[in-house]
Image (tube, rainbow, N blue to C red):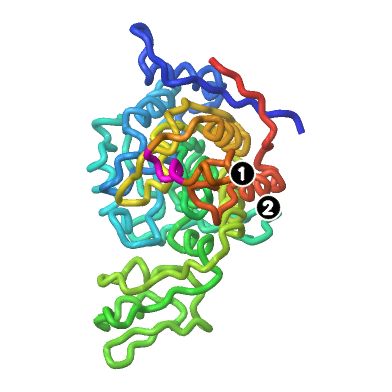
């Protein structure tokens, strides 16, 4: 397969060009302007950051991308899907509040925020996965699939389950509805923490498969009837419906690649990753740790596999930040001393997702780095 081009620039700025202007130049050089945006609804997939986390991308970066789209006649919107777990982004109202709290509003970014899978994480499209090994039909937030053009804007960082959270993670997991996220994380079904259940019956009323019964004011789920749609998780006012998280990290990575394929197939797509504040864990955490390496730069490509590979290579070439979570035990590592993500989370292998994505035809791990 021919090498894919990945475009790169560092974070140096001058009196004549600030970082937002430099990002615009990167997008032009990488060919994003060749996409026909005219009158096209354009989803810009971003992570708004869990409240309490300060490592997420600043909204200024999103404004730069949205302005680029609008200047070419497009109709951009910022989007993400609701989370599977309890937190500040579990439903669309809390999610938008969190986005605004972290600075993502129409006033700061110049475009609207749309939570793609709706109020309770159940507004989803069923999208076939061509050649899917683990997923035959992905459950993707409806607004994302309604878009004419798809752009990913990713904060590249570490991740406790997948090794790193890059372009594939932002797209595959991030675009999954609540049921889609559960499908990727789990080979099982949710259960009820009965100690905190008040027997309100909301989960029972929303279940379309009669899988939930209430006895002595406590709900329970019949896994023989449950199809794993996750709707009960979204409606529980006590947060007592707990999703399973029992899939192996390798299979999780493969499912993320397959969900990514479902999102990008059949329409114009472009991908941007900013490698700064490389925290060891996901921006879904309500905190962020010391970055594991110094800031690297901005990357852009039409190929999501090549983009993730280039970002991972760049991070692994960087020195480890003193005082970060991997600085203490890096000197004792041997086999994986060159892999900062494996040092952060030894039970993960980030290469699985890229290998599987390459097999699916998402792109290639072979790339040509073009520095501007």
CB under 8 Å between callouts 1 and 2?
yes
Pick whichever of labels 1 and 2 is earlier in the sequence: 2
Write down the residue under mark 1: 265
The residue located at (35%, 44%) in the rendering is 289
Residue 367, compared with residue 233, is above or below; it is above
Q: Count the marks.
A: 2
On whether residue 302 falls in the magenta region, the answer is no
Write down the residue under mark 2: 130
Task: Give the magenta-colored segment's residue range.
Answer: 323-328
Left or right relative to 28: residue 192:
left
Residue that sits furthest to the right in the current view: 1
Residue 26 rendering spot, x and y as whole percentages: 49, 20
On whether residue 325 falls in the magenta region, the answer is yes
The residue nearer to you, when weighing 52 against 124, is 52
Secondary element under disc 1, as helix, strand or loop, is: loop
Q: What is the crowding at mark 1: few (fewer than 14 residues within 10 Å), some, or many (at least 20)?
A: some
Quadrant position of residue 309? top right
* Residue 317 in view of the camera: yes
The chief SS type of the magenta part is: loop
The residue located at (26%, 72%) in the rendering is 238
């Amino acid at each position: 397969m021919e090498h894919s081009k990945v475009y790169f620039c560092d974070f140096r700025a001058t009196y004549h060009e600030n970082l937002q202007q430099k990002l615009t130049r990167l997008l032009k050089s990488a060919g994003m302007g060749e996409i026909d945006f005219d009158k096209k609804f354009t989803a810009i997939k971003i992570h708004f950051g869990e409240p309490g986390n300060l490592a997420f991308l600043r909204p200024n970066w999103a404004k730069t991308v949205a302005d680029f789209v609008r200047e070419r006649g497009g109709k951009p919107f910022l989007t993400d899907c609701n989370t599977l777990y309890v937190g500040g982004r579990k439903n669309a109202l809390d999610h938008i509040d969190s986005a605004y709290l972290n600075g993502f509003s129409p006033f700061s970014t110049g475009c609207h925020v749309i939570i793609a899978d709706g109020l309770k994480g159940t507004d989803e499209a069923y999208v076939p996965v061509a050649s899917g090994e683990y997923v035959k039909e992905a459950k993707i937030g409806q607004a994302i699939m309604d878009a004419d053009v798809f752009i990913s804007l990713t904060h590249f960082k570490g991740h406790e389950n997948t090794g790193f959270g890059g372009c594939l993670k932002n797209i595959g997991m991030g675009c999954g509805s609540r049921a889609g996220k559960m499908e990727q994380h789990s080979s099982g079904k949710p259960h009820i923490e009965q100690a905190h259940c008040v027997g309100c019956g909301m989960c029972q009323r929303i279940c379309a498969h009669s899988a939930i019964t209430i006895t002595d004011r406590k709900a329970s789920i019949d896994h023989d009837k449950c199809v794993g749609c996750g709707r009960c998780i979204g409606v529980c006012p006590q947060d007592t419906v707990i999703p399973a998280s029992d899939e192996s990290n390798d299979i999780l990575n493969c499912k993320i690649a397959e969900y990514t394929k479902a999102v990008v197939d059949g329409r114009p797509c472009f991908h941007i990753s900013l490698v700064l504040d490389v925290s060891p864990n996901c921006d879904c955490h309500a905190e962020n740790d010391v970055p594991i390496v110094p800031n690297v730069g901005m990357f852009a490509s039409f190929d999501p596999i090549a983009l993730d590979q280039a970002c991972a290579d760049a991070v692994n070439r960087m020195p480890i930040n003193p005082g970060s979570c991997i600085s203490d035990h890096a000197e004792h590592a041997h086999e994986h001393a060159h892999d900062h993500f494996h040092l952060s989370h030894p039970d993960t292998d980030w290469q699985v997702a890229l290998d599987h994505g390459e097999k699916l035809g998402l792109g290639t791990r072979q790339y040509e780095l073009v520095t501007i």
